[in-house]
Image (spheres, rainbow, N blue to C red):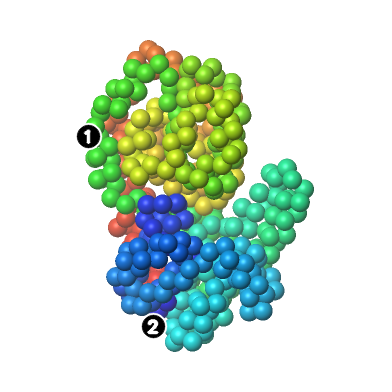
Amino acid sequence: MRLAIFSRPPFPDKSGGQKRAHQLLESISGNCDIIILNPFPKKQHEIQFMFKNSAKNLYIFNHTKLHMFLGLVTSAFLCKWYTPINVRLYFNLKAYFIIRNGNYNDIICNNIRTSPYPTKAKKLYVDFVDCISANYINAALTSRNILTKIMYRIESILTRRYEKFILSKSYKAFSVSNVESKALSFRSYKVNTIPVFVDDIKKSTTEYERDKTKDKINHTSNKLVIGFLGKMDYEPNLKAVIWFIDKVLKKIPEEKLELRIIGGSVPKAIINKTSSNRNIIILGWIEKIQYELKKCDVLIAPMQSGSGLQTKILDYLQTDKIILCNQRSLNGFDCLPRLRNFFILDDPNDYNKTIEKIIQNKRNGVFNNENEILQERREYLFRSFGKEVILKKWKAQLEI
């Protein structure tokens, strides 16, 4: 018997973490029991309907903020003393009893937060996704608040010890990139790299090609339209947008460009900046992402923190738009070839110079061959992030 446990409903079209979880679910679908911790009690029936055919036995346990508090308390008695807070918050008593009383030979954890349960399973599979401890170290270094710095530092130490403990107990462990795998591995304990796949590359890029009207509108518009894609309650996305506004956007006249933020849960820190910057447009969550990306001239990912693979880059690569990113945003894009209209910039001055040049080219009507760019990117995605390629890796590693 096998059991897989997910810290959130593995929806296929939401955040990068949920996409990753959904892809793991696809590789094991129908072959095991599944536990899903659900922070959305009102969506209980929707989640039940969506995933009922994916499991032999499906257990959906509500896990709201109250449950997180209870997890923090009960885990103090049932988990290792060095279990970090970010894991304790997802400890669920109902899941604990299912695992303890069940006769499971294999247990699959969709991230480190679903791993604190004592188990007699012979094989423990853990998808670390990324190195959380390294992310906390970076957060401690960049935070301006002394108390926050101390909290992140303590959490990074506990998380790193816990990562090593879980890795030592794992039969197999995974992450999204070679960089994360190297950061997580220690001694003889190794982490296998399995990236996120792009679902139906041909369909998404073909649909993108069909409607050229938005491109014509952009080419004749006076302003350069810059897009940023990502959930804004995810701190690395928030930091990236604030960095771009403060370091780049403010140095370019308002009449030359506008920044469109495509993503839900926009905090006050961003909303407040729109009052003094009329060229910032908050679109919120958009169902058809590719349709909205099509309206942009340039797509950006100036990540200042965070770890793992930035799925927004995969979304960007399904367009023919100019992409401006930095080295941090390319974690997980191993062996990235030289692609046209794809710029890797780390200095804000380089962003400004590149954007000014793009604005000038737009005014002069200078454009690259869009079909050739799209085909070039499509070939790279098929080769490195194709669904069949990645699912084959999952099935091989999970011995399905």
Q: Quadrant of residue 322?
A: top left
Give, as a three-letter code, the residue at label 1: Arg
- Looking at the rendered structure, the secondary structure element under dot 2 is loop
Are the residues at dot 1 and dot 2 in contact (C-beta closer than 8 Å)? Answer: no
Q: Residue furthest left?
A: 210
The crowd level at tag 2 (other Cα within 10 Å; few <14, some 14-19, many 20+) is few
- Mark 1 or mark 2, which has the lower sequence index? 2
Q: Quadrant of residue 285?
A: top left
For marks 1 and 2, give the CA distance: 47 Å
The residue at 72%/51% (across/down) is 148
Residue 153 lies left or right of residue 54; in this view the side is right
Q: Residue furthest top?
A: 364
Give, as a three-letter code, the residue at label 2: Met
The residue at 39%/29% (across/down) is 296
Q: Up-down: is 134 above or below 185?
A: above
Q: Is residue 94 visible to us here?
A: yes
The residue at which mark 1 appears reads as: 210
Q: Across the whole image, how many numbered discs are drawn on residues?
A: 2
The residue at 43%/57% (across/down) is 18
Q: Residue furthest front?
A: 42
Nearest the viewer among 184 and 28 is 28
Q: Up-down: is 147 above or below 97?
A: above
Q: Position of residue 239 (x, y in %)?
A: 59, 40
The residue at 53%/64% (across/down) is 64
Residue 183 lies left or right of residue 144; in this view the side is left
Quadrant, the N terminus: bottom left
The residue at which mark 2 appears reads as: 1
Q: Position of residue 49 (x, y in %)?
A: 31, 66
Quadrant, the C terminus: bottom left
